[in-house]
């Protein structure tokens, strides 16, 4: 299968700053592909190049087999973008925001009306069609922004932090709608700071830091490779447990006030030994998550 997006040695410089530093990846039709990384890692710079907002400095960027430098108009016409900022027109109603946006893609008015009604129903916004955008909650506004990005029937959907700022209920509602779109065969490129979101939605993902790709793969495979299957956290640990994990080359992070130990799911003997010998008190144990992988690879320190 040919990739729908092909990125090879892609670079983006802003004067003396290199925001994207020679990254390579491919996205295939029907995939939900994630771009994860700390603030300033190069995620937004990458997706802005992908939909033609910002030209690459060097490297290859092909979408639908077309070169973004030469065919950016055609590429943009086939991509829907759900930006993290609220760019809805506050002076228009919910339905007017959809219909007006459809006009930018030369969708005939009657077809735009039909599509807007379908999207309003799909995102449970039908009873708010005449409301002004200013009257919508944050969750409803995010649903409308996503609906607007789909009005042109795009072949690729770009989701830039799609659930930022939403309460848990609204976030799960968005995930349900995105799951339905995924089941329908849509291809999506997602940036997010919510590791649970990436773990649930993405078929594959890359973690980027300082403009470079650190890892690429399926979320569950990355968890197994970099964070094992089980985690034991020991607060106020003694030197004996630290010596134990070092002698046996067990993956761990010593955070000073607590020790995080990563153990493969199948290694039950090791798990039981640590629990019996060192977990008399102040121990917690849980399953590994994508957030553990992210923190192990990008660090836990605060950044400017």
Image: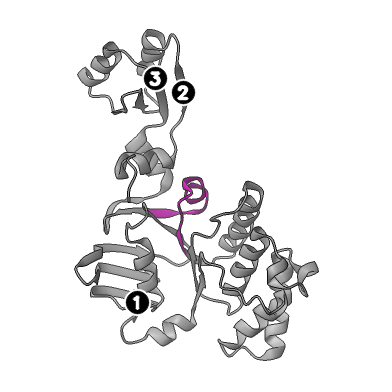
Disc nearest the viewer among 2 and 1: 1
Which residue is at a point 62% across and 57% down the rendered structure image? 174
Q: How many marks?
A: 3
- From this view, report whether residue 270 is shown above or below residue 17: above
| Mark 3 or 1, nearer chain start | 1
Vertical order, 296 against 58 (above or below): above
Q: Which residues are magenta?
A: 189-205
Residue occupying the far right of the picture: 127
* Local secondary structure at mark 1: loop
Nearer to us: label 2 or label 3: 3
Taking 208 as reference, is 179 left or right? right
SS at badge 3: strand
Q: Which residue is mark 2?
A: 285
Q: Does the magenta run of residues contain 203?
A: yes
At which x and y percent is residue 45? Answer: 35, 67
Q: Which residue is mark 3?
A: 234
Q: Secondary structure at mark 2?
A: strand
3D distance between C-alphas at marks 3 and 1: 47 Å
Q: Residues within 10 Å of mark 1 (few under 14, many from 20)?
A: some
> At x 42% / y 41%, what residue is drawn?
291
- Assess whether mark 1 and mark 2 are in contact (beta carbons under 8 angstroms): no
Q: Residue furthest front?
A: 304
Give the labeled residue for mark 1.
54
Expressed as whole percent of the image width and height from the top left, the position of residue 162 reads 53, 60
Find residue 44 and report its horizontal and vertical position in percent.
38, 65
Q: Is residue 250 magenta?
A: no
Mark 2 or 3, nearer chain start: 3
Crowding near pointer 3: few (<14 within 10 Å), some, many (20+)?
many
Q: Nearer the viewer, residue 264 or 42?
A: 42
Q: CA distance from mark 2 to mark 3?
A: 9 Å
Q: Is residue 299 above or below residue 162?
A: above
């Amino acid at each position: 299968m040919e990739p729908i997006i092909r990125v090879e040695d892609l670079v983006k410089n802003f004067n003396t700053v290199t925001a994207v530093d020679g990254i390579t990846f491919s996205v295939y039709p029907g995939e939900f592909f994630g771009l994860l990384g700390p603030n300033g890692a190069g995620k937004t710079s990458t997706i802005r190049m992908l939909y033609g907002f910002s030209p690459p400095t060097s490297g290859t960027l092909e979408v639908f087999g077309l070169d973004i430098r030469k065919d950016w108009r055609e590429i943009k016409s086939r991509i829907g973008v759900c930006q993290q900022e609220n760019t809805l027109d506050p002076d228009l109603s919910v339905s007017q925001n959809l219909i007006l946006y459809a006009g930018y893609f030369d969708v005939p008015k009657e077809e735009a009306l039909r599509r807007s009604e379908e999207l309003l129903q799909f995102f449970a916004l039908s009873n708010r069609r005449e409301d002004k955008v200013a009257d919508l909650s944050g969750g409803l506004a995010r649903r409308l922004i996503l609906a607007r990005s789909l009005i042109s029937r795009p072949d690729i959907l770009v989701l830039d932090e799609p659930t930022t700022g939403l309460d848990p209920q609204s976030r799960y509602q968005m995930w349900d709608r995105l799951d339905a779109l995924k089941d329908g065969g849509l291809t999506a490129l997602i940036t997010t700071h919510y590791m649970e979101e990436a773990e649930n939605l993405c078929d594959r993902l890359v973690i980027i830091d300082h403009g470079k790709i650190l890892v690429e793969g399926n979320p569950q495979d990355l968890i197994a490779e970099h964070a094992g299957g089980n985690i034991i956290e020991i607060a106020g640990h003694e030197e004996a447990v630290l010596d134990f994990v070092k002698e046996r080359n067990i993956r761990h992070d010593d955070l000073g006030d607590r020790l995080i130990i990563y153990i493969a799911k199948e290694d039950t003997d090791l798990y039981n030994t640590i629990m019996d010998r060192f977990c008399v008190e102040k121990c917690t144990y849980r399953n590994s998550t994508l957030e553990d992988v992210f923190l192990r690879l990008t660090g836990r320190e605060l950044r400017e």
